[in-house]
Structure formats: C-alpha cells, structure tokens
Image (spheres, rainbow, N blue to C red):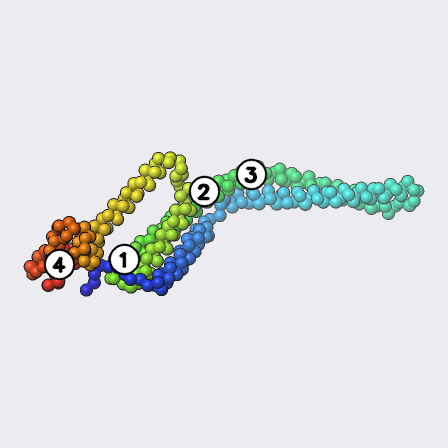
Amino acid sequence: MIRTTDIEELQTTKSEKLLALVMAVFLLIGGIWTYQKLDSYVADGIVQAGTPADRAAVARLDRAYTESGRAERAVGRARVELELRREAYRTALDAGKPADDLERRYREAEAEYARATSRAAAARREVAAAGPAANAARSRIQSDEERIRNRQELVTFLLRSALVLASFIAALAVLARLRNRGSRYLPLGAAFVASATILAFVLAVDYLTDYLEPFDLGLLVLALLGAALTVWAFASLQRYLARRLPLRRVRRRQCPFCGFPLGTGSHCEGCGREVISSCARCGGPRRVGSLRCSACGAA
C-alpha cells in the first residue's frame, strides 16, 4: 500500500546525501551550459544587419579609405626619391661633372611623383564621393543592428526563462512523485530541485536589472514586498504543518493537538483533549490523527 512520505521521515545516509550533491552539481553544469548555449543558438539564427546595397556602400568607402592611405604613402616615397635625385643632379651640375644619367633619373622621379600625386587625388575624390552614401548606410546598419540585438536579447531571455521554468516544473514533479511513492531516490529529486533553483537564481541575477530597476521602486516598496513574501511563505509553512504535524506527533506517541507525551488514558494530560475515539467503520478504539484504524485498517 503506497502512503505519503515526508522528506523528514526518510533516514538518508551520508553517502546518499553526497551522491545527491554530486548529482546536483552535474545537473547544474548541464543546465548552465544549455543556458549559455541558447545565446549562441539565437545569434546564429539572426540575419545580417542592413541591406546588400547598404553593406556595399560601406564596403566601397572602406576600400576608398584603404586605397587613399596606400596612395598617400606612395606619394611620400615618391617625394623622398625625387628630393634625393634632385639633390644628386644639382650636386653634379655644381661640380661641373657629366649629369645626363642623373638628369634622366631625376626626370623619372619627377614623373613618378606626379603620377603618385594624381593617384592620391583620385583616391581622395573617391572617398569624398563614397562618403555621404556610406555614412547614411552605416547609420541605417547601426539602427538595424540595435533592433536585431534587442530582438536577440529578448528571444534569448524568453528561451532561458522557458528552460528554467521547465526545469523547475520537472524537478517539482519528480520530487512529488518520489515523495508519494516513498522512494529511497528522494534525495536525487531534491538535487534536481536544488539545481533548478540555482539556475533560476542565475536567470534572476542575469536579467533583473535589464527589465527592472529595483532601487527605483524605493526602499519602502522593497521592504513591503519582502515582508509580504515572508508572510506568504510563513502561511504556506503553517498550512503544511497543519496537515503533517498531527501525524508526526501520533508516530512519536504525542498528543496530536499540543505535542504532550501520551500516557495510557484516552485524554491528553497536557491539554485534556480526547486522543482516543471510536472508529467510524468498526467502532473500535482509534487514536486521533492516525492514518488507519488499528482494528480494521479503515482509513
């Protein structure tokens, strides 16, 4: 016959507690890995920001800047070469030496400098021409990236919340089933609940300030909220104890009403209330608060 078993009733060994802790750690590792992996999964499914035309405009400006920098460096090298050839040519003329070859090299360096200057000017014109369209495109791309990033964060938050909620519900379901069956695997169910709770705490810490500014509510509101949650938790605990405490006292041969140790009489020596009544089925004596009659076994 299956009966309800409280967590406190199980005599869990230290080895079982240790294995339950190990189980909680491994479940938490897998949960956090999945929690982090969801962000990459969502990012892989997001389309690239901006239209192809906008990206082409930005790429054109980037190429123009690259070419302009290359052309300016070429102008610098050509200028240095020109100055060296001119100085050598002038020195030869001042010394009255033959300078035909030096003059030719000087004219070549002069022509190369002119070509480099022309290419640099063309590169600057390309930068000026590509700039307005690229700047407008970059602005649209940045706006699109912000929209995509906000959407990615929202989808990731929803998926992570679903993961935490599903884990918590599954953990509670497993724990409730193990409790109802009085299973010796109950510590593993508790480990499942603990890992799901820690994962929920990770979610709360990760996203609390993203969608809520708790300190903007004021310390008074936070205090009232905390007090209300504490009262709710205390009331829930009292309802639980009201259902379970009498049965525990009966098992310990205590009065189900006040907890005073029972003697052989039909009334409690502590509060005076009746602790032995008649069974509704067989009429035999039955201890108040017991699950079943000791004479006929009726519930």
> Regarding mark 3 in the picture, which secondary structure is present there?
helix
* Residue 119 seen by the camera: no
Q: Which mark is residue 264?
A: 4
Eye-nearest disc, 3 or 2 = 2
Disc 2 residue type (three-letter): Arg
Q: Residue at x 59, y 40 (%)?
A: 130
Q: Which residue is mark 2?
A: 147
Question: Is the C-beta separation of discs 3 and 1 under 8 Å?
Answer: no
Q: Quadrant of residue 227?
A: top left
Disc 1 residue type (three-letter): Glu
Mark nearer the N terminus (3 vs 2)? 3
Q: Which residue is mark 3?
A: 135
Q: Residue at x 40, y 56 (%)?
A: 28
Disc 3 residue type (three-letter): Asn
Task: Work out how far the residue at label 4 is from the one at label 3, CA to CA, in angstroms.
Answer: 94 Å
Q: Which mark is residue 8?
A: 1
Task: Work out how far the residue at label 4 is from the one at label 1, CA to CA, in angstroms.
Answer: 28 Å
Eye-nearest disc, 4 or 2 = 4
Task: Work out how far the residue at label 3 is from the one at label 1, CA to CA, in angstroms.
Answer: 68 Å
